[in-house]
Structures are given as structure tokens and as C-alpha cells.
Amino acid sequence: MKLGLVGRKVGMTQIFDNKGSLLPVSIVKIEPCCITQIKTTETDGYNAIQIGYTAAKSSKITKPIKGHLKKATENSFRYFKEFRVPEIDEKWQLGMELALDQFEIGQSIKVTGTSIGKGFTGNQKRNNFSRGPMTHGSKNHRLPGSIGAGTTPGRVYPGKKMAGQMGNKTVTLKNTEIVYLNETEKLLILKGSVPGKKDSFLTLTAK
């Protein structure tokens, strides 16, 4: 069983592959990840590994978090991520730093992040609806149109596609290919786009 890693999106660029094709790629820098807690069925009711990432100054960490980290490592971490596992492997120890050895070039991984928020948007942008006629006196250009069935049922059904908040949701890409890997700099170059904007956090998990 492999644990996931947390990275920070650096940005996007484009590179040429061996066949000369131009590929859009996303650059992800892996954060220092350390095992800070091991949860078991006996103590917590389920098996999971908690990792801490993004080192911070000691003055920025609260006393409860310092006490929590004292059992595992001397470093200070600001954020935590938990990965559920079917069973606890003996090789996982408190304070263990996770490396990039679980990833390799050409491998397909699962990438999870928060998409860019677009604010309050209309039906056409949010749900890809068509617009109304623009001529012959029509005043229904970008309006939603009918949203109910009339007197019966006399209400709008839940889940109706309407205007509202767009983006800012958890998005998971299940087949993102690793184009290049640099263990020294802890960089991953992934084919295509990934959720979120620059400096947003991404969870990378081997399939």
C-alpha cells in the first residue's frame, strides 16, 4: 500500500516529447511530508496514516499542535492530511519522511485539488445552456426560462440546473500521466492541467 503525497502547484508550461509533439504540462513541487500519526482500529476505530506538510515557524504553530507533533518529529507543520489504509504496514513509523520513490515516469496517478472559484455565474456559463433568440423582439437572451411544471407540483424540483456558485469544489483527475520526475528538486511534471490555481495544494496518489 502506497501513501499519497501533497504538492503545491507551481504553474503550467509546454514541452516537446520524444516524438516532437507539443504537450501542455503542469509543474507540481512536492512539499516536505512526514508521518505525524498512525491510527489503528484498536485506538481510533479505523486504520489511517496522518501526514504533516508545509513546514512553518514554531511561532506560527499553536501549543496543541506542538504537543501533537512532539511525539513524531521536531519539525513544525502547518497542515495535515489523512490517508485511510486497509492495514498498517510495519515500515511506517512516526517521523518518517515520505519520498518520491513511489512515482515513476509514465505512471498514471490520481490528482485531487480544489478548482478555481468563478463566483456567481449564470446558466450559460455554469451549465453550458444555449441562449435565447436575439431578434424579432425577443427579450429572452440570457434568461433561464421556465424552471417549474406549473400549479402541480407548484415548486422547483431539487437539483434543478440554475445560476449559482461555480467552481471552488473538490475535483479529482484519475488518470494523470507523469511526464518528468526530479527527486532532487522534488518536482513532478504532469501531462495536461490539474485543479486549482498557482500555489494551491494538490494530493497525489499512486493508483
Image (cartoon, rainbow, N blue to C red):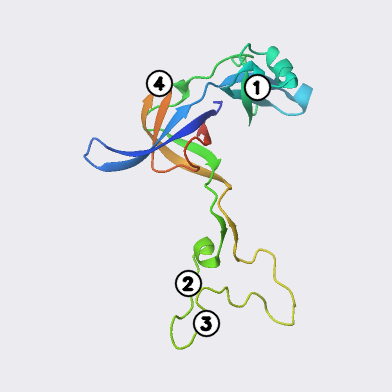
Give the mark toward the camera: 1 or 4: 1
Disc 2 to disc 4, how far (Cα)? Answer: 47 Å
Q: Which residue is mark 4?
A: 185
Give the mark toward the camera: 3 or 4: 3
Who comes first in sequence, dot 2 or dot 4? Answer: 2
Disc 1 to disc 3, how far (Cα)? Answer: 56 Å
- Amino acid type at mark 3: Lys
For mark 3, give the secondary structure: loop
Q: Which residue is mark 3?
A: 139
Image position, residue 60 (x, y; %): 65, 22
Who comes first in sequence, dot 3 or dot 4? Answer: 3
Label at residue 130: 2
For mark 1, give the secondary structure: helix
**Residue at 50% over, 62% down:** 125
| Figure quadrant of the N terminus | top right
Which residue ends up furthest to the front in the rendered image? 59
Disc 3 to disc 4, how far (Cα)? Answer: 58 Å
Q: How many marks?
A: 4
Image position, residue 62 (x, y; %): 71, 22
> Circle 4: is it few (<14), some (14-19), or many (20+) Cα within 10 Å?
few
- Amino acid type at mark 4: Glu
Name which quarter of the figure residue 35 lies in: top right
For mark 4, give the secondary structure: loop
For mark 2, give the secondary structure: loop
Disc 1 to disc 4, how far (Cα)? Answer: 26 Å
Who comes first in sequence, dot 1 or dot 3? Answer: 1
Give the mark toward the camera: 3 or 2: 3
**Residue at 53% over, 53% down:** 118
